[in-house]
Image (tube, rainbow, N blue to C red):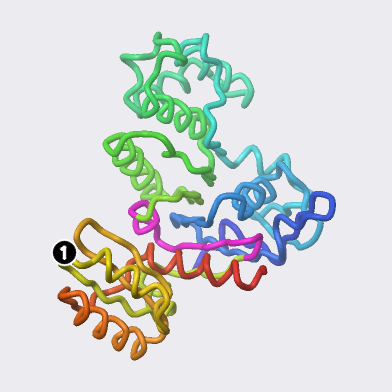
Amino acid sequence: MTPPPAIDVHNLVKRFGDRTVVDHVSMQVAAGEIAGFLGPNGSGKTTTIRLMCGLLIPGGGEGQVLGHDIRRDGAAIKREVGYMTQRFSFYEDLTIEENLNFVAGLYGLDPARQAVADTLANLGLTSRKRQLAGSLSGGWKQRLALAACIMHRPRLLMLGEPTAGVDPKARREFWDEIHQLAATGLTVLVSTHYMDEAEGCHKINYIAYGKLIARGTVAEMVREADLSTVVLEGPGVAEAARLLRSLPGVDQVAAYGNALHVIGRDGPALLRATRDVATRTGTTRHEAAPSLEDVFIQLVGEAQETAA
């Protein structure tokens, strides 16, 4: 028997004054799933997460998180959710161990000392437990924040751009930890701007201007976007870019070193435009598969047009 979704919310609305930040958002996340939550800055991701973890009350809509009603059971949801914000929010003049002792006290963990010791060991923090939090690098601060989120053994992790500003090695190690946790049955909802991180999620939810405009696996989203991509290469790509931006069928033009990626929904028009420009500029061209980044940029552009 399939377990109920960890997150199952419908038509969530949140307004601040006359501004609608979350506009009838519905989302389902299966138990044990790593769900990506993507969208441009200011799109409503953080507010939606706060609605679902009991920190904000929706102005409209309904739903359940871990079987608890988001309107009535905020306290119960908070006890079973680990929420990690983008901003480092621990005491920088306390050690790693002292910060975790404080968090253990907040959750009433008993015995707290054992819970802290186990968490330090599980995340490789034992050797640094007496290091001041303020002296940690971005990657180790991130590891401390994750430790505090999972110490009370939540059933759901909600992560708000957790790897922003950390180096690639620390990002890789963090995601290794997330996949190991998910393998134990933990559900994860993570917002990110990194396409490689999004591609590591089981499913993706994309929000823009407060509206959820796309969701599915990476393959489903790329397929449903129905984009065509042509790559031009050669010394004339700068001139090719200038010519292409005004032609029918061309929605995006992006430079990648000595190559130019040209993307559009109208495949035949895109092929005609790139063929003519390649001839004029002496560049070579070939068709390629659209990337997830191409899809998201297209979605943002269309959402902007709709909002306008």
Residue 269 lies left or right of residue 33; in this view the side is left
Q: Quadrant of residue 256?
A: bottom left
**Residue sitting at x 39%, y 18%:** 136
In this rendering, the answer to whether 257 lies above or below 159 is below
Please state the horizontal and vertical placement of residue 117, each as a whole percent of the image.
Answer: 41, 19
In this rendering, the answer to whether 90 lies above or below 241 is above
Residue furthest bottom in the image = 268
- Quadrant that contains the C terminus: bottom right
In reply to whether residue 210 is colored magenta, the answer given is yes
Please state the horizontal and vertical placement of residue 270, each as a whole percent of the image.
Answer: 34, 84
Please state the horizontal and vertical placement of residue 60, each as a whole percent of the image.
Answer: 80, 61
Give the magenta-colored segment's residue range: 196-211
Viewer-proximal residue among 125 and 174: 174
Residue 172 lies left or right of residue 142; in this view the side is left
**Residue sitting at x 60%, y 52%:** 45
Local crowd size for mark 1, using a 10 Å CA cut-off: few (<14), some (14–19), many (≥20): some
Three-letter amino acid code at the position of disc 1: Pro
In reply to whether residue 64 is colored magenta, the answer given is no
